[in-house]
Image (spheres, rainbow, N blue to C red):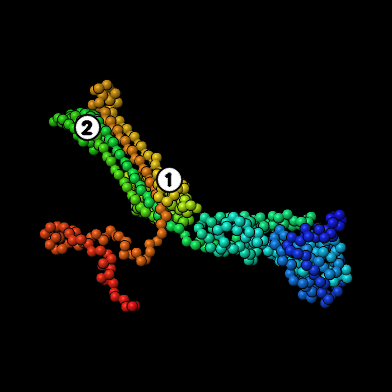
C-alpha cells in the first residue's frame, strides 16, 4: 500500500485515477469550527458506520457528482488526518499521496456524504451524488441503432428512463432489453478500486416511455376446412323360438339384432317363432368450412370464435348442495399474436382450435336427499399452437389433425354363432368407421386504414341489392328487383346537404 501511495502521488497516476473528470481543488472553509479530537481511528469505506451529522458542520464546496463504476480525484487545500463515509454502499473514498488528494468512486445510484478532519481536527462535510452512467448507454444505443436518433436515455431517482419515438415495436423491445442489461451491469457489478470496498446488490429499474411512430396492423386470413366421413356396415340374423304349454310360456332364443335394425326380411309363425335378417350400409360425409378475417396491431393478441357457449354446473359445497354455472365455449376459435419484423417479415404465433359437443356426454349420479341421474356435456377438442415467420401474402398450412376411429361389435349365441356358415344366422355384426381430417390455412397481410376521402369507393355487400316492386314481389315472386342499383357515390351526392359556396 505504501508503494501504491508513492506512485499515486505522481502526476501520471493522478490522471489515470481521474475517471469521472478533471481533478478539482476543494478549499477548506475559513469558518469551519474546531472540534474535539476524534477518538475513532481512520476507517476504511467498508468499516465506516452510518453517522448522524450535525447542522453546525460546514460543507466543503459543491457536491461531488460521479457515475456508477466511475471515479474522480479532488485536491484539498489542507492535509486530512481522518475520513469517514456515511453510506459505503453508495460510494467509497480514500486519501492518496500526502493526505491532500481525495479519491472518490461510485458504487450504486444514490446520495451520501463524507466527513473530513484536518490535522487540527476541524470537520467538514462533502456531499456525494452517484448517478447511473446514461451517457455510456446513450452511446451504445446510437451505435447499435443508428436510425433511432430520437431515443434518449436519462436518469431519474436512481432509474434509467427511456424516452423518444421508435420506428416499430421490435426496435422498442430490443432497446428495452439492452437498457435492462446495462442497468444490471451498472448496479454495483463494477469492481471496486480499493480493497474492501462494498458493491451494491440488485438491479436498477428501467422506466419505458418509448412510443411507436406508426404501429403496423396485420390482418390474418384463416381458412378452416374439416372433412368427416362415416362408414357403417351391419349384417345380422335373429332366430326366435317361443311357445306356450298350459299356463307357462318359454323362449329359447332372443333377438340378437342391436339398435334399430333395418329388416331385410322377416318370417313369423303363429306361435311367435320367427326369423329376421338385417343388412345395411351407410355412408356419411360432412364438410365444415370457416373463413374468418382477424386484425390486430403488431405485438397485440387477437381472437375469433364461431360457435356457442353452454353453462356447466359446478359443485361448490357438498353439505348444502350449492352449485354454480361455469361458462364453456365451443366451436371454431383462433388466437394469434403478430409481430412485424424488419424487411416486412411477420412473426406469427397462432393457436387454432376446433371443439364440439360430444353426443354421449358423461353420466353422473347426484346425492343428497333425493338421488338423481344427470348427464354432463363432454367436448371433443382439437387444437394446435405454432410460431412461424413469413412475408406479407405468404400462406402456411397446419394439417395432420386426423382422427380415425374403428368400432366393431359382434353379438352371437354361444356355440351356435361359431358354426361355420350356419353360425351367421345366430350372430349380428356391426362395423363402423369414423374418419375426420382438419386443415388450417393461414395467410397474414400488412394492412393500413382506409383514407376517409375514399369512403364512397368502398364496396359493400348491400350495394347490389334493389328492392322489388309490388308487382315483382306479389305477381312474379321475386325478392330482388330487376333494376340496376344506383351508384353509392351518386346517392351520396344527391343526399348530402349543399355546403356554402367558398368561391
Write down the residue under mark 1. Answer: 384
Which residue is located at x 31 percent, y 64 percent?
A: 456
Tell me, for residue 278, which label it has, or none. 2
In the image, residue 422 sits, relative to residue 316, either above or below, namely: above
**Residue 493 in sight in this render:** yes
**Are the residues at dot 1 and dot 2 in contact (C-beta closer than 8 Å)?**
no
Q: Which callout, 1 or 2, points at the residue further toward the start of the chain?
A: 2
Residue located 28% across and 68% down the image: 492
Residue 88 appears anywhere in the view: no
1 vs 2, front mark: 1
Going 33% across and 44% down the picture, which residue do you hit?
226
- Describe the element under mark 1 as helix, strand or loop: loop
Report whether 413 appears left or right of 188.
left
461 displayed left or right of 441: left
Q: In what quadrant of the picture does the N terminus appear? A: bottom right
Q: Residue at x 85, y 71 (%)?
A: 122
| Disc 1 to disc 2, C-alpha distance | 43 Å
SS assignment at label 2: strand
Residue 205 located left or right of residue 259: right
Residue sitting nearer the eye, 351 or 39: 351
Locate residue 159 relative to residue 244 in the image: left or right: right
Residue 477 place in picture, x, y as percent: 14, 57
Give percent across and percent down for residue 250.
Answer: 21, 30
Q: Is residue 177 above or below residue 225?
A: below
Tally of numbered tags: 2
- Coordinates of residue 225 in the picture (x, y in percent): 34, 45
Which one is in front, 239 or 9? Answer: 9
Position of residue 156 measured from the top left corner of the image (x, y, whole percent): 63, 66
**Would you call the spot at circle 1 few (<14 residues within 10 Å), some (14-19), or many (20 or more)?**
some
The quadrant of the picture occupied by the C terminus is bottom left
Amino acid at each position: 500500500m505504501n508503494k501504491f501511495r508513492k506512485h499515486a502521488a505522481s502526476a501520471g497516476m493522478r490522471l489515470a485515477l481521474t475517471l469521472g473528470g478533471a481533478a478539482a481543488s476543494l478549499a477548506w472553509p475559513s469558518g469551519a469550527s474546531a472540534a474535539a479530537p476524534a477518538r475513532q481511528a481512520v476507517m476504511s469505506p467498508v468499516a465506516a458506520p452510518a453517522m448522524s451529522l450535525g447542522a453546525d458542520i460546514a460543507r466543503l464546496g459543491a457536491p461531488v457528482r460521479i457515475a456508477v463504476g466511475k471515479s474522480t480525484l479532488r485536491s484539498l487545500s489542507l492535509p486530512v488526518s481522518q475520513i469517514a463515509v456515511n453510506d459505503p454502499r453508495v460510494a467509497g473514498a480514500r486519501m492518496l499521496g500526502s493526505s491532500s488528494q481525495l479519491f472518490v468512486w461510485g458504487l450504486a445510484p444514490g446520495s451520501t456524504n463524507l466527513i473530513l478532519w484536518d490535522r487540527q481536527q476541524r470537520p467538514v462535510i462533502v456531499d456525494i451524488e452517484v448517478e447511473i452512467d446514461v451517457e455510456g448507454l446513450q452511446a451504445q444505443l446510437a451505435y447499435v441503432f443508428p436510425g433511432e436518433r430520437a431515443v434518449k436515455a436519462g436518469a431519474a431517482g436512481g432509474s434509467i428512463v427511456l424516452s423518444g419515438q421508435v420506428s416499430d415495436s421490435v426496435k422498442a423491445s430490443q432497446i428495452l432489453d439492452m437498457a435492462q442489461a446495462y442497468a444490471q451491469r451498472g448496479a454495483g457489478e463494477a469492481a471496486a478500486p480499493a480493497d474492501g470496498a462494498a458493491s451494491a446488490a440488485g438491479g436498477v429499474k428501467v422506466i419505458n416511455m418509448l412510443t411507436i411512430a406508426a404501429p403496423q396492423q396485420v390482418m390474418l386470413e384463416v381458412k378452416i376446412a374439416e372433412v368427416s366421413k362415416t362408414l357403417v356396415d351391419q349384417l345380422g340374423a335373429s332366430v326366435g323360438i317361443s311357445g306356450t304349454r298350459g299356463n307357462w310360456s318359454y323362449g329359447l332364443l332372443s333377438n340378437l339384432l342391436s339398435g334399430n335394425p333395418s329388416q331385410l326380411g322377416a318370417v313369423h309363425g303363429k306361435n311367435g317363432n320367427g326369423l329376421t335378417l338385417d343388412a345395411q350400409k351407410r355412408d356419411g360425409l360432412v364438410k365444415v368450412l370457416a373463413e374468418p378475417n382477424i386484425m390486430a396491431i403488431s405485438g397485440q393478441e387477437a381472437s375469433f370464435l364461431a360457435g356457442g357457449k353452454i353453462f356447466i354446473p359446478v359443485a361448490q359445497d357438498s353439505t348444502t348442495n350449492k352449485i354454480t354455472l361455469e361458462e364453456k365455449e365451443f366451436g371454431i376459435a383462433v388466437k394469434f399474436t403478430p409481430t412485424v419484423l424488419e424487411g416486412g417479415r411477420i412473426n406469427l404465433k397462432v393457436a387454432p382450435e376446433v371443439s364440439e359437443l360430444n353426443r354421449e356426454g358423461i353420466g353422473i349420479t347426484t346425492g343428497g336427499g333425493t338421488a338423481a341421474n344427470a348427464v354432463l356435456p363432454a367436448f371433443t377438442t382439437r387444437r394446435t399452437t405454432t410460431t412461424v415467420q413469413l412475408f406479407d401474402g405468404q400462406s402456411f398450412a397446419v394439417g395432420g389433425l386426423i382422427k380415425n376411429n374403428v368400432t366393431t361389435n359382434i353379438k352371437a349365441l354361444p356355440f351356435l354363432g361359431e358354426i361355420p356358415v350356419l353360425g351367421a344366422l345366430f350372430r349380428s355384426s356391426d362395423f363402423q368407421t369414423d374418419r375426420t381430417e382438419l386443415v388450417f390455412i393461414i395467410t397474414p397481410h400488412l394492412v393500413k386504414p382506409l383514407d376517409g376521402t375514399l369512403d364512397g369507393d368502398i364496396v359493400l355487400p348491400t350495394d347490389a341489392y334493389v328492392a322489388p316492386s309490388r308487382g315483382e314481389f306479389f305477381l312474379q315472386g321475386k325478392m330482388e328487383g330487376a333494376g340496376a342499383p344506383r351508384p353509392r357515390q351518386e346517392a351520396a351526392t344527391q343526399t348530402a346537404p349543399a355546403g356554402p359556396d367558398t368561391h
